[in-house]
Image (cartoon, grey):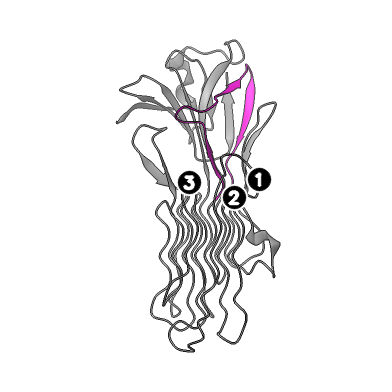
Amino acid sequence: MPLNSTRGAASAKGFGLTAGSNPPVDFDFLIISGGGGGGGGGGGAGGYRTSFPGGTKITIKGGNTDITVGAGAVGSTDTRGESSVIGITAPITSTGGGVGFNKTDNPNTNGGSGGGAGLRAPCFPQQVGGDGNFGGFSPPEGNNGAPGNNSANPGPASGAGGGGGGAGGAGNVGPSQAGPGGNGAASSITGPSITRAGGGGGGARTISSGGTGGPGGGGDGSPGNSQGQDGQVNTGGGGGGGAPGNPGRPGGSGIVVLRAPGTSKFTVSPATNTISVDGPSGDKIAVFTVSGKVVI
């Protein structure tokens, strides 16, 4: 279903609006936070929450309402991705993705989706990945990261990181390599079905390939001799895990989408955020790729 008539805040006059003079608007929403950065394991995807289709809408009243789009976390650091927030009276928020480290070493491995556990040689105990749904939401905003793979065999599986969790599934432990990131989740709130919030793949120490990033923007993990991939921007994808000499990669920034009937009157700012019209339904769809405001 194509989107038509994309407009930014600079064209708000085309909707015939005066800020603060219009009735409240009931919106469906999709809110995804910034993805976690990779460490040895893959970064967890940013928390994923949505009302579309068939969930409870939110009401935004006249005036300016802040929309925060969370940034992805830097790779190989000890902080989660940043939260995204719809700043209504009872804010709608989701949790940044967990970092790709060992949960026992860094509690920030927990997040919207959990980060994968880091590299460990066979002589060390296996480490667990981080917990997803750190915000305690129902339905959950994400899934757990995977343990690292430290097979008793000191050969090719030695020191392989676990995959970060994704919105649609937990991270994975690779049977003979680093673990793939968890799957993202698909939404058609903007018209076509788009998958976002995939987990980052685990990094590898001595094996031939890193874990693949989860569908929905998760970055591939380092194959040991080169860098992995960043989580994709505006998907909340987790960053790919790293390896000695190749640090983990940053998580992708989040996104906020608001969808309302075509008769609704509102604008968005700044101009990099857009309002589009879904051709088949006539609904107006505001997409926030950076932090800004919605004005009713």
What is the x, y in percent for residue 274? 45, 31
Indicate which disc, 1 or 3, sits on the residue closer to the N terminus: 1
**The residue stretch that appears in magenta:** 46-70
Give the CA distance from mark 1 to mark 2: 7 Å
Name the secondary structure under disc 2. loop
Is residue 213 depicted above or below 273 in this figure? below
Residue position for label 1: 135
What is the x, y in percent for residue 71? 58, 49
Q: Are marks 1 and 2 in contact (CB under 8 Å)?
A: yes
Q: Quadrant of residue 39?
A: bottom right
Give the CA distance from mark 3 to mark 2: 15 Å
What is the x, y in percent for residue 235? 47, 48
Task: Rate crowding at label 1 as few (under 14), some (14 to 19) or many (20 or more) other CA atoms within 10 Å.
Answer: some
Q: Amino acid at mark 3?
A: Asn
Task: Rate crowding at label 2 as few (under 14), some (14 to 19) or many (20 or more) other CA atoms within 10 Å.
Answer: many
Q: Are marks 3 and 2 in contact (CB under 8 Å)?
A: no
Residue position for label 3: 234
Residue position for label 2: 112
What is the x, y in percent for residue 139? 56, 40
